[in-house]
Amino acid sequence: MSEKPIISVQNLTKSYSADITSGVRDINLSIPEGKIISIVGESGSGKSTLMKLIYGLLAPDSGSVYYQEKKVLGPHEKLLPGHESMKMVTQDFNLNIYAKVYENISSMLPNTDLKAKREETEEMMEFLKIDHLANKRITELSGGEQQRVAIARAIITEPKVLLMDEPFSQVDALLKNELRTDIERLSKYLGITVIIVSHDPTDGLSLANEVVILRKARLQETGSPVDLYNNPKHLYTAQLLANCNILSRSEAGMLGLNVQKSEIALYPEWIKIGEGDTGPFTVKGTVFKGFYEELILEKNDVSIRALNVSPGTYQKDDEVSVSFNRFLEFDS
Ligand code: ADP
Ligand code: MG
């Protein structure tokens, strides 16, 4: 990242208790302007804490957050907590549930120019495709619609940075694609830097320019989705992103792999079935996944999952030969 970051996080630490895995610990991070950043980690890894520290809702124990090279003030250092150039959409949306959609959004703007206020609210509702809901009350909306109102409310004040805590856990599978498209549009057309927090990496992988992996309060690694997926520096990253097979060196040896380090990650799509000489493997079962299936293969009591894009080709107890395109080795 050569461009000047819009946000820079330096040696940031915040703990809630003596437990060193509570909060976040010694985080360093630069966030480039206009990009979509996805912060990924298991539940309890410190994602929400990091987001609140970036926004200024929490004060760090040590270290700092800088917004365009100026220190972000904590909640006790200013009248209204939260940085004025950022907005956060939380999991509870924070809407006025008795008011109408229109009022929820327009109330974010001052009354100095009523015509502009109306026009901007209408524009924002159109942008997020909720203009037909203008006169509905929040209680009459679905979760996905409420989320759009919350996003509209956040971005109508033209923040430079939008923070979203677990936005994908609020919508069902069908709406996830729409939410992805919305986030892409507001990044592209409004130039907003978007920081998304998610416990499920697959939600952000196709969307993010940069992925940040948190593990037990610490930053594990950062990179583009493609780099992190294909060349993770840590086994944990591979596990989190790729749903891969993890084998010890001796298990790998049982499969005929020559491994130097103590653990290996073998992605299901790196296993080629029906070719090669590392055989025979026995097909122990198939797991239907729709347009593909997972084959459970076993050799010398070691079992692995392989991707098969032509479901139905193999039956249980078939013997197949296998080759490995690639595998990753890690020191534990
Ligand atoms: P995530 O958003 O990744 O699920 P959080 O940032 O909410 O994680 O929490 C990180 C860790 O800090 C967890 O172990 C959690 O229990 C702890 N924690 C978070 N908020 C508080 C709090 N207000 N008081 C005490 N512990 C907290
Ligand atoms: Mg959280």
Image: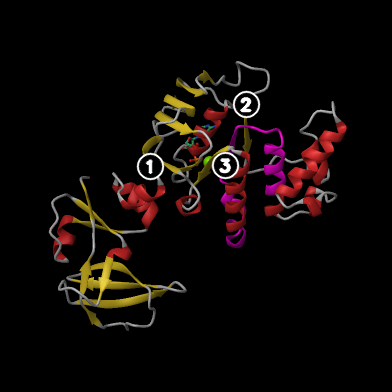
Q: Secondary structure at mark 3?
A: strand
The mark found on residue 223 in the picture is 1
**Quadrant occupied by the N terminus:** top left
Residue 72's image quarter?
A: top right
Q: Is mark 3 within 8 Å of ligand 2?
A: yes
Place of residue 234 in the rendered image (x, y in percent of width and height, measured from the top left): 29, 45
Q: Is residue 156 above or below residue 244?
A: above
Q: Is residue 82 above or below residue 240?
A: above
Q: Which residues are magenta?
A: 147-176
Residue found 61% across the figure and 48% down from its top: 185
Q: Amino acid at mark 1?
A: Gly
Place of residue 228 in the rendered image (x, y in percent of width and height, measured from the top left): 35, 47
Residue that carries the numbered disc 3 in the rendered image: 165
Which of marks 1 and 3 precedes in the sequence?
A: 3
Residue that carries the numbered disc 2 in the rendered image: 82
- Look at discs 2 and 1 and give the one toward the viewer: 1
Residue found 55% across the figure and 31% down from its top: 52
Residue 113's image quarter?
A: top right
Residue found 62% across the figure and 50% down from its top: 182
- Estimate the spatial distance between the alpha carbons at disc 3 and disc 1, rounded to whole Å: 20 Å
